[in-house]
Image (cartoon, rainbow, N blue to C red):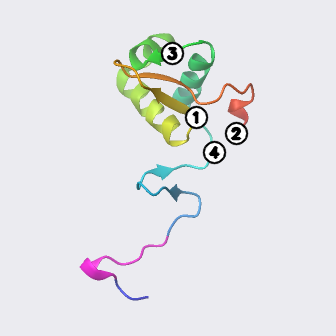
């Protein structure tokens, strides 16, 4: 394989990880959720409206940094969306009863 210009060489890609056009990495939905991610999903499933990261943190008893990491991972998996609000709020992308079965 020829080296690419700029000294970068083509790297083998992990077939389990996909990247989008924007360069963001999307994890396959079959990968298991962490305990924090599961807690955030359950919290969001219990409410009819979106919640802020702080509200989620209070409900799941997690540090703000841990909640932010879980929300970021869940948005990359396209399970949670950030709502277009002044204060960042989050909601489930789908309200399927089997959301954890993915």
Spatial CA span between label 1 and label 4: 9 Å
Residue of label 1: 79
Give whichever of discs 2 and 3 has the lower sequence position: 3
In percent of width and height, residue 21 lies at 45, 58
Spatial CA span between label 1 and label 2: 10 Å
Spatial CA span between label 4 and label 3: 22 Å
Marks 4 and 3: which is nearer the front? Answer: 4
In percent of width and height, residue 9 lies at 36, 78
Marks 1 and 3: which is nearer the front? Answer: 1
Q: Considering the numbered disc 1 on the image, is that residue within a helix, a strand or a loop?
A: loop
The residue carrying pointer 2 sits among few (fewer than 14), some (14 to 19) or many (20 or more) residues within 10 Å by Cα, namely: few
The disc label shown at residue 29, or none? 4
What is the chief secondary structure element of the magenta stretch? loop
Spatial CA span between label 1 and label 3: 18 Å
Residue of label 3: 60
Marks 2 and 3: which is nearer the front? Answer: 2
Give whichever of discs 1 and 3 has the lower sequence position: 3
Spatial CA span between label 2 and label 3: 22 Å
Give whichever of discs 4 and 2 has the lower sequence position: 4
Give whichever of discs 1 and 4 has the lower sequence position: 4
Q: Which residues are magenta?
A: 4-12
Residue depicted at x 44% and y 88% = 1
The residue carrying pointer 3 sits among few (fewer than 14), some (14 to 19) or many (20 or more) residues within 10 Å by Cα, namely: some
């Amino acid at each position: 394989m020829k080296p690419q210009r700029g000294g970068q060489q083509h790297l083998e890609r992990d077939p389990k990880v996909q990247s989008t056009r924007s360069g963001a990495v999307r994890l396959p939905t079959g990968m298991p959720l962490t305990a924090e991610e599961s807690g955030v999903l359950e919290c969001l499933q219990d409410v009819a409206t979106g919640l802020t990261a702080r509200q989620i943190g209070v409900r799941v008893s997690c540090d703000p940094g841990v909640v932010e990491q879980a929300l970021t991972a869940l948005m990359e998996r396209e399970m949670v969306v950030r709502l277009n609000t002044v204060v960042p709020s989050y909601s489930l992308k789908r309200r399927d009863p089997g959301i954890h079965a993915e």
